[in-house]
Amino acid sequence: MMKPRNWALCASFLLFAAFSLFAKTIGTGTISVTSSVVGTEIFLDGISLGAAPVSQSAVPVGLHQVAAVRAGYRAERRIVTITESETTTVRFELAAASGTLEIRGLPPETPCEIEVAGIRASGNRIILPEGARTVRVRVFGYEDSTFIARITADRVTEVEAELTPVGFAVENLKVSRTAFNPENPAPYGSVKYLFSASAPGSGKITVLDDRGNAVRTIEVGPFAERRQAVDWDGRDDRGDPVPEGTYRARLDAVGRDGTKSRSGDATTRVDGKRPFPPEGGIFCPPESAALSSAGPRGTVSFGANARLSDGDFGSGMLANVGIAPNAEISCGADLGVIGGEPAIDATAAVKFSAVGGPVGRALVAGWTGRAVGTDELKDRAGLFFAPAAGGRLGAFGLGLSLPIAFGDAFGRFDDPYLTVGAAASIEAREGNLACAISGRIDSDRLDGPFAPAELWRIGVFSRYAIPRTFVTVAAGLGWKSAGGDGAPFAQGGFGVQF
């Protein structure tokens, strides 16, 4: 006796044969099928046409069933009408077939993480595509468990956890920032020590100075999860800010079973001249370059701003990267409309600084110029060299700079000349807010009659560090003059430190 499935196949074959004979008298059309998923197999009246995209001609006019099938996706079927001598287009948008995996037998109130092909979920449940999946289960205090689970669409697949306790250890002690200033507001005035613990336990982080003396002991734990983080505010055990210098941290811990473990060393530098946020870009006016040190290595800051003055508009970006303990490089670009014409300006510079003592010293050198544009720069351009000095007294700071530039009005060297200038900035800060009054004056070209006030500007700038973030917003207003023509200017932007 024939099975129902065989009867269905015979009926489909006879139906297709009947349609083929009938098509000779009623006409045919064409069907074209596409799918959102590559490799989808297309069936017409139960007969495979191959993988989409696919077309089939000589299809009898009338009603037909089209199906799209792809492993891991929900199959779709449609009834379409074929019209004589026309092409019928069908598009399938397949949805992934998924089910739920549930891990049973986990220790109560213990953090658990399930990972499958880069998909992670906390807890004991995760939704996964249909099919065989390699699953990794991470439970705090136990070895990772890896197995293969077969997921069925629209069902819950239950798997019993097979867990083996792991030995206690702490490792990978790191520090979130390479340098910071404890006098700055949060988060610029502190660092985080990050490490991992394999099982429950507790311990302490000991912060040591460059002579090996312990200045701060921080209790950590009890550990309830793998990833751990603890803050250090740059102060010693008495609550006083530690002196400038390099500090290393060591982690000593004991597991619940009595096992001891150590991880270290994580090194950071306390820099009393480091502002919140760093210098450069929209963070501060350039006249205050000596109010903070450069670097340190690995520190990255990024700023973006916009400016408006006398009908001219510009926006730019600047990035600073620490390349040595007291050196950083900067590069930036500005795009705007100057004198009704598009303009692109570029800047590249390096900054060196001296740390320590009541007076900070810095040297900034580089090049700035106009890469595209017909109107000359309203500021000095070309190669520049600017020694600077500055210092702070409580909440106030004073910065001085003597910029020297060599180049033409576009920063090029077709007809170069030398100019000199002077700049100053007075800054005050309270908490997360800082304000500065700054000014700069530049001479005319030194190969002609001396004109000390050929270029000048003065302005008020402010910046605010958003609490619990490394984002700073800034704004400025002022007046600038070029060759006797003065105009107000306004600028604003934001910056991020990494």
Image: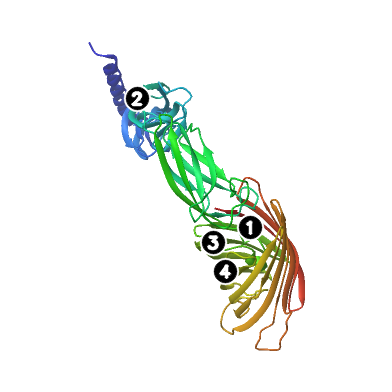
- In the shown orientation, is residue 80 left or right of residue 44? right
**Nearest-to-viewer mark from 4 and 1:** 1
State the residue position of label 2.
Answer: 162
Residue 6 in the image: above or below residue 373 = above
Distance (Cα) linking label 3 and label 4: 18 Å
**Nearest-to-viewer mark from 3 and 2:** 3
State the residue position of label 1.
Answer: 275
Circles 1 and 2 in contact, beta carbons < 8 Å: no
Q: Where residue 206 sits: x, y (%)?
A: 50, 45
Q: How crowded is mark 3: few (under 14 residues within 10 Å), some or many (20 or more)?
A: many
- In the shown orientation, is residue 117 left or right of residue 417? left
Q: Residues within 10 Å of mark 4 (few under 14, many from 20)?
A: some
Q: What residue type is labelled 2?
A: Glu
Q: Which amino acid does label 3 sit on?
A: Gly
State the residue position of label 4.
Answer: 347
Q: How many labels does the image show?
A: 4
- Pick the residue in front: 491 or 168: 168
Q: Quadrant of residue 130?
A: top left
Residue 372 in the image: above or below residue 208 = below
Q: In which quarter of the image is residue 448?
A: bottom right
Distance (Cα) linking label 3 and label 2: 50 Å
Q: Which amino acid does label 1 sit on?
A: Pro
Q: Quadrant of residue 25?
A: top left
Mark 4 or 1, nearer chain start: 1
Distance (Cα) linking label 4 and label 2: 60 Å
